Amino acid sequence: MHEKARLGIMASLAANRDGVVFNDLKRLCSLTDGNLSRHLGVLSDAGLIEIWKGTENSRSQTMVRLSSTGRERFAEYIAVLESVVADAQAKTQTQPSGQPLGGNWSPA
């Protein structure tokens, strides 16, 4: 899920609980039809999303939304990212910047 396009898809779907129509998702994620289809296939095979087919104004439509598993896994993923950022911020605040590394290290 950490691949850039898949993360964008997951974030877009997480922000739209009822799902997103394929063309809107394509626009939101700046992907081509084929690229989006491929990523959706991978996410669907992993059980992270649901793909629904229907019609609107006599035209076929594809609706995509997060599965309950996908919503849980995305929330867990975001929590891990937040933890990594918090750890990095804490280390930045406790270590003075610009200090030499010591040992056998020297500035390049």
Image (cartoon, grey):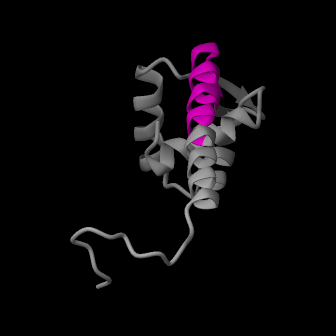
In front of the other: 11 or 62? 11
- Taking the magenta stretch, the answer to whether it contains residue 34 is no
Identity of the residue drawn at 78% across and 26% down: 18
- On the image, the x and y values in percent for residue 30 come to 57, 58
Check the picture and name the quadrant holding the C terminus: bottom left
Identity of the residue drawn at 63% across and 32% down: 79
Q: Which quadrant of the view contains residue 14?
A: top right
Give above or below for 25 relative to 20: below
In front of the other: 37 or 85? 85
Q: Is residue 57 left or right of residue 81?
A: right
- On the image, the x and y values in percent for residue 102 come to 32, 70
- On the image, the x and y values in percent for residue 66 come to 63, 24
- On the image, the x and y values in percent for residue 24 come to 69, 47
Q: Which residues are magenta?
A: 63-81
Q: Residue furthest bottom?
A: 108
Q: Which quadrant of the view contains residue 69?
A: top right
Number of on-image labels: 0
Identity of the residue drawn at 63% across and 41% down: 82
Q: Residue furthest front?
A: 103
In front of the other: 54 or 106? 106
In front of the other: 103 or 68? 103
Identity of the residue drawn at 64% across and 23% down: 71
Q: Is residue 54 left or right of residue 56?
A: left
Give above or below for 86 relative to 42: below
Q: Is residue 24 left or right of residue 1?
A: right
User: Visible in this render: residue 9?
Assistant: yes
Q: Residue furthest top?
A: 68
- Taking the magenta stretch, the answer to whether it contains residue 80 is yes
User: Visible in this render: residue 51?
Assistant: no
Give above or below for 45 relative to 32: above
Q: Main secondary structure of the magenta part?
A: helix
